[in-house]
Image (spheres, rainbow, N blue to C red):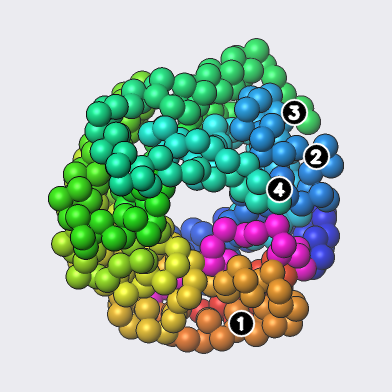
Amino acid sequence: MATVSQGGPIVEFDRHNEEVRAVWEAYRARRPIRVPVIAGIGTRYTILRRDANPSGVTFGRYMTDPQVMLEHQVAHQWWVRHNVPQDAEMGPPKNGWHVGVDFQNTYEAAWFGCPVRFYDRQVPDTAPILADDRRKRAIFDAGMPDPFTGGIMRRNWEFYDFFRARQEEGWTWRGLPIASVSPAGLGTDGPMTVACNLRGATQFCTDLLADTGYATELLGFITDATIARIQAYRCKLGHPPKTPGWGFADDSIQLISTRLYEEMILPFHRRLVDAFSEGGPNSVHLCGDATRHFPFLRDQLNIRSFDTGYPVDFGWLRRALGPDVEVNGGPSVVLLASASPQQVREEVRRILSSGIMEGGRFVLREGNNMPPEVPLANVAAMYEAGKEFGLY
């Protein structure tokens, strides 16, 4: 029965994992005993924290050397499993490591030809290729990128093949094998977000009002390509063409009104959902100030699970969505990075007393994607406060 301290209580893995199983079984059976608490900690957190990255891996190396990516991913999983308190299995994984090609949020824009940029102490990003009005139609002339060889996707499948080869060779880390391998590109960050990546957010939002024909053509081009890519990947990997429900993201819709969303973006979201969902319930991730869209999305796309960022008025959101819609959210990452553990505790108490727990369909998490500046003591404070104030 191994134990670990992470700036909070000592965790006994066996007892913790038994409690986690009970919490999730009760939640999924719609008989919750308390609010589940999770932490969205990706490789950004460990790459940009010295205590979690003793070898000094950079995103530049991570995204260009498959062995570096493989080794950091499994080290990341080990570190999270031994340091981050949440309602997830802790301790060594039972079946081995789950590894996947990880180009952060650059992969779609880079597939269409945007150059990837690396920065100190920050995640990689892409530069727009259609910002110049004189060249904004160049993407149509170039045609749809090949799902397997276009842009960064050639490297995606080279990395995937590398990971599979290591798996077949019996490669292990800390005595554990690779359990599964996945490529990037099976999901999407959303057609409007990709359009903003390609054109620039200011330019594309202007297009939505001043050049609607071009905006519609670009959204259609992106949507066609996205559907073709995901279908090709599902076929190659032996995945079913559709699943009962499907999830996607499109953070950039926070920039527009619900009326403009309905007119300009909804048709493309509907095409994506129709292509990959058997009808739902479906899910969506939307960071930013986007909750005004949620009731409309629930009704139009059968969205029954919302993953949120900030700002969020949780009491209003529960009243607007009703008791049967799942909401994931919690303290903003800004607060978690700057507050004391006591302040984190009070914020969790405030959120959980807002009415968001009605119906038993709330999962507490940071809002959204834990930055490396958040101390582990604050992650522990969020978890303990969720357990204290999230009882049903």
At mark 4, the secondary structure is: loop
Q: Earlier in the sequence, mark 3 or mark 1?
A: 3
Q: Is residue 198 visible?
A: yes
Mark 4, other Cα within 10 Å: few <14 / some 14–19 / many ≥20: few
Instruction: Check disc 4 and report the residue beneath it.
Output: 120
Instruction: Check disc 3 and report the residue beneath it.
Output: 173
Q: Are marks 3 and 4 in contact (CB under 8 Å)?
A: no
Instruction: Check disc 2 and report the residue beneath it.
Output: 56
**Horizontal and vertical percent for residue 295?**
26, 72
Is 7 within the magenta?
A: no
Q: Residue at x 66, y 25 (%)?
A: 65
Q: Is residue 61 left or right of residue 198?
A: right
- Looking at the rendered image, the disc whose residue lies closer to the viewer, 3 or 2, is 2
Q: Alpha carbon of mark 3 to alpha carbon of mark 4: how far? A: 29 Å
- Looking at the rendered image, the disc whose residue lies closer to the viewer, 3 or 4, is 4
Q: Is residue 99 left or right of residue 10?
A: left
Give the residues in magenta: 359-377
Q: Is residue 143 left or right of residue 87?
A: left
Q: Alpha carbon of mark 3 to alpha carbon of mark 2: how far? A: 19 Å
Instruction: Check disc 1 and report the residue beneath it.
Output: 347
Q: Amino acid at mark 2?
A: Gly
Q: Earlier in the sequence, mark 2 or mark 1?
A: 2
Q: Is residue 131 left or right of residue 218?
A: right
Displayed quadrant of residue 139: top left
Q: Earlier in the sequence, mark 2 or mark 4?
A: 2
**Horizontal and vertical percent for residue 51?**
83, 50
At mark 2, the secondary structure is: loop
Q: Nearer the viewer, residue 279 or 311?
A: 311
Q: Alpha carbon of mark 2 to alpha carbon of mark 4: how far? A: 12 Å
